[in-house]
Amino acid sequence: MTTVPFGQLLILPVLLFALGVLGVLARRNLVFILMSIEIMLNAAGLVFIIAGARWGQADGQIMFLLVLTLAAAEVSIGLALIIRIRARLPSLDSDAANLLQG
Amino acid sequence: MNITFYLAATIAVLATVMVITRANGVHALLYLVVSLLAIALVFYSLGAPFAAALEVIVYAGAIMVLFVFVVMMLNLGEIAAVREAQWMAPRIWIGPSILSLILTAQLAYMLVSNEIGNTGRAVVDARAVGLALYGPYLLCVELASMLLLAALVGAYRLAETGRSGVIKGGH
């Protein structure tokens, strides 16, 4: 059994984070923007796990637990906001949300 | 065998590319679930079985269910039935199914050959994580509980409905 090099392990979260950034920048639908944020948070958690595995410590998995909690809280608030926006605006286009007033 | 790590990583990237290029929200969610399952397998091959289980239960389970609920809610309308029939077309679910089957085969192989942590790292099991979590990291648990409570109250207030059942106007 050979060891996968640390640098090769880090390629995966970098790619995933870049894809998440691309999603946020390219998509205008709010649901897709939220999904891309999830992808980015997940990539950050993956880096913690990789670092924890690199040094054989449990701290990485604990930080992943905190990222998971943050993602759950962020998704619940974000989706509630999306439902509110949908009730007031005809579309979920994030460019249309600048018409909100008061 | 390191091939399981590389294969799972490839599936994760492929599925994520499919997520950000789909036009339909439900199709993107299907691929997002596959991507999260692939990342869970990566965790498993990195020697973090507890994190892998949490990834499947919380991310691919709970958070994705929230997304599916909201996407379905937003799509309600007269044409909803027609669109649902379109979602059942084989060309929609065949892609995620193939990727999931590959992941399942990998997981079965890793379980049978007992190859947890097969990227050459030491396995950090759930016991070590629990001891650290409720020892030096106890304050983090408290902070996480406060964060979840704030999210609960915030989501309740944001989605609050009036007596008529419609979502109230904002203040």
Image (spheres, coloured by chain):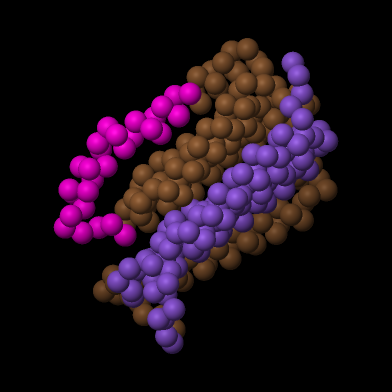
Chain colours: A purple, B brown
Which quarter of the rendered picture does the N terminus of chain B lie within? top right
- In the image, residue A50 sits, relative to residue A25, either above or below, namely above
Name the spot of residue B160 as percent of width and height, x first. Answer: 40, 70
- In the image, residue B99 sits, relative to residue A39, either above or below, namely above
- Residue B56 is drawn in which quadrant? top right
State yes or no: residue B92 in magenta: yes
Q: Residue at x 43, y 69 (%)?
A: A94
- Residue B162 is drawn in which quadrant? bottom left
Which of B49/A13 is in front?
A: A13
Among all residues in the image, which is located at the extreme bottom?
A: A102
Start and end of the magenta stretch?
B74-102
Q: Residue at x 77, y 51 (%)?
A: B138
State yes or no: residue A55 in magenta: no
Say if residue B9 shows up in the picture.
Answer: yes
- In the image, residue B158 sits, relative to residue B62, either above or below, namely below
Which of B5/B112 is in front?
A: B5
Name the spot of residue B82 as percent of width and height, x first. Answer: 17, 48
Which quarter of the rendered picture does the C terminus of chain B lie within? bottom left
Name the spot of residue A12 as percent of width and height, x first. Answer: 64, 39
Is residue B2 shown left or right of residue B112? right
Q: Residue at x 77, y 40 (%)?
A: A51
Q: How many marks?
A: 0
- In the image, residue B47 sits, relative to residue A43, either above or below, namely above
Among all residues in the image, which is located at the extreme top?
A: B113
Say if residue A49 shows up in the picture.
Answer: no
Q: Main secondary structure of the magenta part?
A: helix
Name the spot of residue A4 as percent of width and height, x first. Answer: 74, 27
Q: Residue at x 38, y 67 (%)?
A: A93
